[in-house]
Amino acid sequence: MGDGKKSVFISHSSEDERAVMLVCQALERNDIGCWVSSRDIPPKADWAVEITRGLEETKLVVLVLSENSVKSNEVLKELTLASQMKMPHVIFRIDKVKPNRGFMFHLSIEQWVPAANPPNDRQLQTLVGVVDRCLLDLKRTWWRPDPDGFWYRGGRKRTLPLLGLAIAAIAALGIFGVPYLRDLVIGDPADVTARRQMTQDASGADSLAAAERDTAGTPSDVTAITGQSSPILADTRGTVTLTTHPSGASVYLDGDHVGATPLRDHELEAGSYTASFRLAGYRSETRDVEVRAGGGSVVDVTLSRALTALEVTSIPSSAEVVLDGSRLGTTPCTFDRLTGGDHVVVVSKDGYATRRDTLALRVDRPYLHEARLERLVGHLTVTIVPSGSIAINGDPKAEDSNAPYTTALRPGTYEVEARHVIYGVWRKTVEIANGDEKNLVFDFTQEFDLTVTSNPSNATIYVNDRFRGCYTPYMISVRPGLRRIDVRLAGYHTLGARELMVEEGVGTFIHFDMQRTP
């Protein structure tokens, strides 16, 4: 692993901050120090100066390649400066994007590491391994040039001895080719086969010397590369197309969610993967996927429905059952061939609170759902003074009694009628809610003031067709209940008698407009 110092310059777009922080954390957890502009540039500092300083203090550039970074002028400037300083690059591609020509000019030699956005742990660990190998190769480099033209070893500038100057002079005359070291080419031989594009010098001999590698596949040495060759790394990625019948299944590769089917030409590093397909109402399926470098794989899966059974009972029974919005019968009842997943069961019965439950059903396992319904009830007590008969919504409940009458009622609105053989009828409306305890008293012994007026005045007043011995305008006393009020005057007539429910706060005034009789 690294030495803990800031060895890596992370070039990125500010819009990819989340992915960049994951990259930085992964590297620094492995003791590879990172320089990140959003973190390491002090407030109000000169951006250009700080970027230059950051590149000078680090050894390797990790470019977080995305749709945002290829559009960023700042990223292009960083790559230009890094290219001038001959710093090697590692490309960490988090979007399926192709670098434009400006980027490709600076990325002639690099390690490519494909990833998702945001990258997963496996992809980050691959990046850590690539960066670690790059830094190791840089440490093994014997002689390197610096931007001022000096050759140095182990990171310190040293003037070459006379022999070195002589060799450099001979090389400058064209005997050995162009005398400067190119960027380091890093990678596993199994991954870089046929990746190098060789050029030839004037003598026709290859001008690019391949690094000798040990049996483990790690570069055992790094050699100077002369000439103007541009080695190109071949792609180590492949694609896979994942489809299901029906489509819309969630796709997981090695446990990471990567999208939904159909998922076409999904880029991955070459290797073996486990693909899982999940769709509500269907059995989950798993397939082994082999991704070949530069190749494409196709996986097509037909999903089978996942079914289960549900039995619904209730206390009390004979309650109506609605499953997922469809009425299916009354309890007890059984439903076969239900798909796995969430189902909404509604159980209802008159006089009881409706029960609504969401059941998470699993396939191949029958379920029993018992709904215990809570009775909805309120209580009403009716008393008549001095006595009388009681009816609720027209249904007789008590006859000529002065005892309180109590009954249980479902929540709702009710009309209660009290009837006295002498005082007549008195009606009241009452609202009953669940748990209510209400009392209604019909006291016919009360009297209420009623003002009767007419135009013209001096008309005789009648209550229930009985003359009260008074004339309008007049305030009379009447007992509560339904009363028939009328006025009469010789030579005049009204539209007829009017009924008025007299009770406290209601029916305290009545007026008649009379018309002359022809």
Image (cartoon, helix red, strand yellow):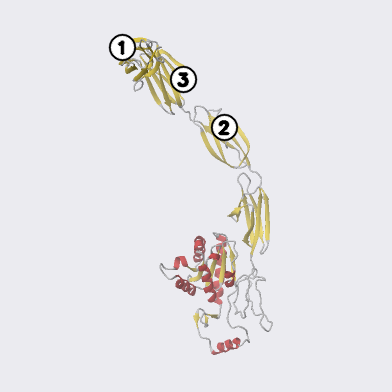
- Proximity of marks 3 and 1: CB atoms separated by less than 8 Å: no
- The circle drawn on residue 470 is 1
Of callouts 2 and 3, which one flags the residue occurring earlier in the amino acid sequence? 2
Q: Nearer the viewer, residue 164 or 37?
A: 37
Residue 250 numbered tag:
none
For label 2, the crowd category at 10 Å Cα-Cα, with few meaning under 14, some 14 to 19 and many 20 or more, is: many
Residue count near mark 1 (Cα–Cα under 10 Å), binned few <14, some 14–19, many ≥20:
some
Q: Is residue 408 above or below residue 283?
A: above
Among the 4 quarters of the image, the one containing residue 387: top left
How far apart marks 1 and 2 lie (CA) works out to 66 Å
Identify whether 468 is placed above or below 231.
above
Q: Which residue is mark 3?
A: 393
Q: Foreground mark, 2 or 3?
A: 3
Residue at x 66%, y 76% (from the top left corner): 198
- Marks 1 & 2, CB-CB < 8 Å contact: no
Residue type (three-letter) at the residue carrying disc 3: Asn
Task: Provide residue 193's location: percent of width, then percent of height.
Answer: 66, 70
Residue 303: x and y in percent read 66, 47
Question: What amino acid is found at the position of numbered circle 2 in the picture?
Answer: Val
Task: Check disc 1 and report its element: helix, strand or loop.
Answer: strand
Q: Nearer the viewer, residue 68 or 219?
A: 68
Q: From the viewer's perspective, is the residue at label 1 or at label 2 nearer?
A: 1
Q: CA distance from mark 2 to mark 3?
A: 30 Å
Q: Which residue is mark 2?
A: 321
